[in-house]
Image (spheres, rainbow, N blue to C red):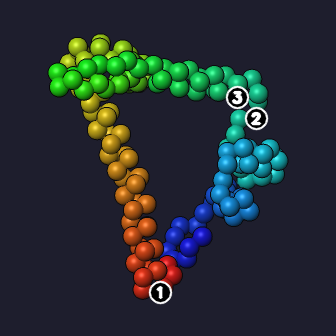
Amino acid sequence: MTTGTTSMPSPWQLELQRLAKVHDGLKPQQVVDEARDPSSPLHPHFEWDDTIAAEKHRLDQARQLIARCKFTITTPAKKEIKVRTFISTEQHGERSYKPVEIIASDDDLLKLALDEMKRDFERLEKKWASHREYFDAMIAARAAGTVL
């Protein structure tokens, strides 16, 4: 962990940092194995009721299956592009997957999808911008012979 001005990590964050140091990185299986101990600060972040956990896992599998469903179109410029068949949308506080051709043909759904796409891009940009700032600061500190 680098030094400098940082917020105080919570116990579960410290435990992840400890595991990363011990294992030279993190693998999800290592995290789950450590979290099995009820005294671990990671333990409360997992669902330990196997019935509930299995259902959540099946829901994740369903989301992945829906996301893998794609078709190929050829643009007027003869370029082939793969498009997801279904797009996740939220209407009236409920999320569902709608066929892309329905979204494309409905002005309200299209606006919702494009607005969500814009928010996703903004979130990605914000996520990676903070990493970029961190890496730039580390590079500058290394070049100056200092440590943050």
Q: Are marks 3 and 2 in contact (CB under 8 Å)?
A: yes
Estimate the spatial distance between the alpha carbons at disc 2 and disc 1, rounded to whole Å.
47 Å
The structure residue drawn at horizontal position 46% and vertical position 24%, both measured from the top left corner, is 67
The residue that disc 2 covers is 48
Three-letter amino acid code at the position of disc 1: Gly
Mark 1 element type: loop
Q: Quadrant of residue 28?
A: top right
Estimate the spatial distance between the alpha carbons at disc 3 and disc 2, rounded to whole Å.
7 Å
**Label 1 packing within 10 angstroms: few (<14), some (14-19), many (20+):** few
Q: Is residue 117 above or below residue 112?
A: below
**Label 2 packing within 10 angstroms: few (<14), some (14-19), many (20+):** few
Which of disc 2 and disc 3 is earlier in sequence? 2
The residue that disc 3 covers is 53
Three-letter amino acid code at the position of disc 2: Trp
Farthest bottom residue? 145
> Which numbered tag is attached to residue 145?
1
Residue 63 appears left or right of 28: left
x and y percent of residue 104 in the render?
25, 18
Mark 2 or 1, which is nearer the eye?
Answer: 1
Estimate the spatial distance between the alpha carbons at disc 1 and disc 3, rounded to whole Å.
49 Å
The structure residue drawn at horizontal position 32% and vertical position 33%, both measured from the top left corner, is 116
Residue 33 appears left or right of 127: right
x and y percent of residue 110 in the render?
25, 22
Q: Are marks 1 and 3 in contact (CB under 8 Å)?
A: no
Mark 2 element type: loop
